[in-house]
Image (spheres, rainbow, N blue to C red):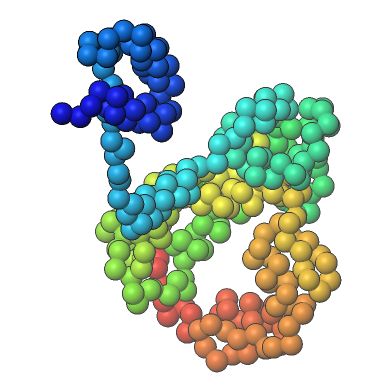
Amino acid sequence: MVESSKLDHFILKYLKRTNRHRSLKEMQKCLDEKKPKDNKISKTLSFTIQKPPERRKTDFDPINAKKREDRKSKTARDKTVQIPNDFLKIAKKFGLPKEHLDFFYEHRKSFHWESKDKTKIHCFEKTCKFTMETSKDCLVDHMKTVHNYKDVECDKQDCLFFGFSQKNLNHHTATFHGHGKRPDEYGIHPCPYSSCKASFRYRDGLRAHVNVHTNTVFSCSFCQYRSVEKHNLQNHLNLHFDIKKHVCDVCSISFTRKQDLHRHEKIRHSDTEFECTHCSFTSPSFNAVKKHGLSCTERLKHSRIL
């Protein structure tokens, strides 16, 4: 058997090395009591020394870790932008409609939040300079009396579209039911209405087309404007609040819509000739090509009258 003194010495070293100060102190006290007495008398400790638990080892898997990070980043990207409560309080104070809070939060740097009385909204007709204080349906009366806005029903088959003005209905009839709409040769998604021969390459195009049939639209909270596409409503609100964030690099003229900037650059700052997309007609004048398109025989071969 191992001698008692050697065993005590070994335990003391173990306790000191593992920083068990309380156990070391108690054992030292027991040894001090043991010295003056007979060495043959053995004493047992009043406590047991337990082995520390083994540390669990985990194998790091870089592939799975990367997948988890990718899932987290994808989840973060998919989340919509949360509008802060401070901004919601300001929006409520200024009387902004809930339907357009995402628009106002996106363009919050374009507005000067001074007071509700000083918030002005513009008529979106190009030739009209009318402005007034912002409130729900504030421009409805103006559009009715000055610009003759009214709901006009489309009389074509399988079409529930309602134009907000006669001009809007004419545009709908010309673009949705009229001549010259070239069919997409890759269109694999046909319109579900038997009276309509349109087909589309992607489902998003078909969904927007059907929304016109069913008159499923996004509406403005200030006037009668409606549109199937949400980005058209965004451009419409930019007109209401005179937000022009698309600037020409050559002449510094600003535009509300990106397509208006591209059209300006082609007409004003391009030396190339304009070409008809249906035939070989070319002209240095954009208006001449546009006028030619009304009577282009190649374009009129494609008809989608319902």
Image mark count: 0
Quadrant (top left, top right, bottom left, bottom right) of the N terminus: top left
- In the depicted structure, whether residue 178 falls above or below residue 3: below
Q: Is residue 188 visible in the rendered structure shown here?
A: yes
Looking at the picture, how far across and down is residue 300, in whole percent? 47, 78
Task: Give the quarter of the image for residue 262.
Answer: bottom right
Report whether 231 appears left or right of 108: left
Report whether 6 appears left or right of 212: left
Looking at the picture, how far across and down is residue 62, in whole percent? 36, 57
Q: Is residue 207 visible in the rendered structure shown here?
A: no
Looking at the picture, how far across and down is residue 173, in whole percent? 49, 59
Looking at the picture, how far across and down is residue 88, in whole percent? 64, 28
Report whether 116 appears left or right of 10: right
Towards the viewer: 27 or 128: 27
Quadrant (top left, top right, bottom left, bottom right) of the C terminus: bottom left
Task: Give the quarter of the image for residue 139.
Answer: top right
The residue depicted at 69 percent of the width and 88 percent of the height is 272
The residue depicted at 77 percent of the width and 68 percent of the height is 248
The residue depicted at 75 percent of the width and 44 percent of the height is 109
- In the depicted structure, whether residue 85 falls above or below residue 228: above
The residue depicted at 41 percent of the width and 60 percent of the height is 205
Towards the viewer: 89 or 135: 89
Task: Give the quarter of the image for residue 219.
Answer: top right
- In the depicted structure, whether residue 42 falls above or below residue 279: above
